[in-house]
Image (tube, rainbow, N blue to C red):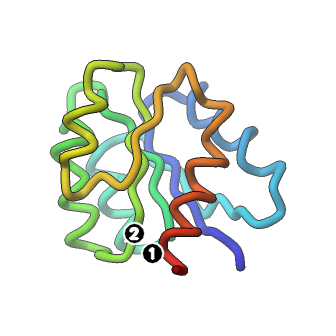
Amino acid sequence: MRVKILIADDAPDIRFLARALLTVDGRVDIVGEAASATEAVEKASDLQPDVVILDQGFEGSLTGFEVAPRIKAAAPDIKIVLFTAYHGLKEDAESAPAIDAFLLKTDAHQLLAVITGLFAEKSS
């Protein structure tokens, strides 16, 4: 089974890093990228990915916490990984109903494992 992923981050270098880390696995398809929170909602609705890698701190836009419920409303089965540089948000992310996983950008090497774990949960 292949996992379709949307990468939503306003930083092009982070989108590149996520793509590079994930495309080494043949089970992953990057179906799109979004550079803003609004674009993330639109693309999630249009592309219907399995997972959205979602930034918390979009430049001049909604936060990841604010946009996650909108993504879930557009596509309820999507899993959302909050991918952020803000360590202090872990507890909030774990209690947010629209966030399925939390990962610090400094732990980017674990991105594939986090996504694989979500899919293992989804299929069980």
Quarter of the rendering occupied by the N terminus: bottom right
Residue 109 occupies quadrant: top right
Judging from the image, what secondary structure is the residue with disc 2 in?
A: loop
Q: Nearer the viewer, residue 96 or 44?
A: 96
Direction front: furthest residue:
124
- The residue tagged 1 is 48
Q: Earlier in the sequence, mark 2 or mark 1?
A: 1
**In this view, 108 is above or below 7:** above
The reply to whether dot 2 and dot 1 touch (C-beta < 8 Å) is yes
The structure residue drawn at horizontal position 30% and vertical position 27%, both measured from the top left corner, is 57
Separation (CA) of disc 2 from disc 1? 7 Å
- Identify the residue at image location x=31%, y=33%: 56
Identify the residue under disc 2.
Answer: 78
| Amino acid type shown at disc 2 | Ile
Element on which disc 1 rests = loop
**At which x and y percent is residue 110?**
63, 37
Compared with 26, 63 (above or below) is: above
Q: Which mark is residue 115?
A: none
**Residue closer to the observer: 8 or 101:** 101
Across and down, in percent, residue 114 comes to 56, 48
In the displayed structure image, the side of residue 23 where residue 53 appears, left or right: left
Horizontal side, residue 86 vs residue 81: left or right? left
Which one is closest to the eye, mark 2 or mark 1?
A: 2
Relative to 78, residue 37 above or below: above
Image x and y of residue 28, in percent: 71, 62
Instruction: Describe residue 5's horizontal placement relative to residue 23 as left or right.
Output: left
Name the residue at 38% across, 41% down: 82
Category of crowding for the residue at label 2, using alpha-carbon neighbours closer than 10 angstroms: few (below 14), some (14–19), many (at least 20)? many
